[in-house]
Amino acid sequence: MINVNKLNIENYISFDGTTFDIELTYELFGQPLGESPIVLINHALTGNSSVSGSKGWWNSIVGDKKLIDTNNYTVLAFNFPGNGYYGKLIDNYENLILRDIAKIFIIGLEKLKIKKLYAIIGGSIGGGLVWEIASISPNISENYIPIASDWKSSDWLLANTRLQKQILNNSSNPVHDARIHAMLCYRSPLSFQKKFDRSVNEDTKIFNVESWLLYHGKKLQKRFQLSSYKLMNHLLSTIDITQGGKINFEDIIANIKGNIFIVSVDSDLFFTDCQNRDTFYKACRIKDNIFFKTIRSVHGHDAFLIEFDQINKLLSTVFKREKVLDSNF
């Protein structure tokens, strides 16, 4: 049974000066609040707070005797406000940026009387949110773990979010069609080749890769609302812990006291491995306790939702009670 809780954050003023009444929903897994170290998990663009259990999107990572063992940790997962999962939609979403979501999550932690986290972890936009939270509250967590993400929206990412926006605003079947385009960013050419190898669907007589794309378009269309997709796509384009260069990147990194584990995917087309390595090179000149981990996969960006064995190995030392910090860079 899904047990979604709600926090009301009234009169929140966004970074552009707009006032919102925010309905922040969340789920808890594992140990009760206050009894064990807390792990905050940030979901990805079409994800939600159901990170564990029979329908949990990360149940290979989170659960009984899993990497994030619910016998040892309290697991907290907020929903992005406006993502449509047991919460109100947001019409004026363009008055929010990802930094606002980070601030809202921090307010949520305060309302739950949580002063310290053991770890914050998330993939894709959820990893971008890890960076944003770290930049605002550099002492709130012992460990920051952004996976398949970065601290900024690159030019490539901005180009793709713009195309997604055009599809969402102009297509007669917007969620379906935008999802088809997105799947081309989430996987890699080699992943497609290995999976389909130009095979043909015997029923429809079209290529299996086309059938697969149409299936994912229809699947998301059934469970995700247009306004939520527009919101999340917009937020994806606003990742930038330097606030457009107003704050020096090196100064932000120097203020973060906790360990940072950058987890890259070597075939990622969305947040590239090169981009992540560049971030690591810049940050490790200032900060000693920053580490680089690599998921090696043909599957591209979505490897953080596929390569569970690798994630378990790469982060096993982080989630053991006695940790030995190392880098596989």
Image (cartoon, rainbow, N blue to C red):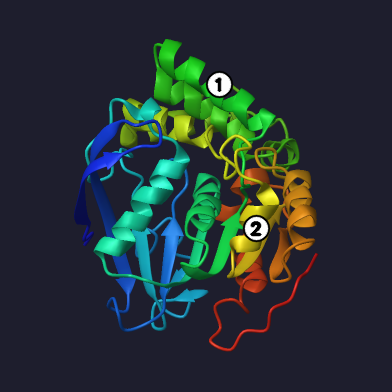
Question: Looking at the picture, does residue 134 appear above or below residue 181?
Answer: below
Q: Is residue 49 visible?
A: no
- What separation in Å lies between label 2 and label 1 (alpha carbons)? 29 Å
Image quadrant containing the N terminus: bottom left
Q: Residue at x 52, y 55 (%)?
A: 130
Say which quarter of the image contains residue 260. bottom right
215 displayed left or right of 150: left
Question: Looking at the picture, does residue 212 appear above or below residue 7?
Answer: above
Q: Residue at x 61, y 48 (%)?
A: 149
* Tag 2 secondary structure: helix
* Mark number displayed over residue 162: 1
123 displayed left or right of 89: right
Q: Amino acid at mark 2?
A: Ile
Q: Residue at x 67, y 84 (%)?
A: 324
Q: Is residue 191 visible?
A: yes
Which residue is the site of mark 2?
253
Of 60 and 124, nearer the camera is 124
Question: Looking at the picture, does residue 116 appear above or below residue 219?
Answer: below
Image quadrant containing the C terminus: bottom right
* Tag 1 secondary structure: helix
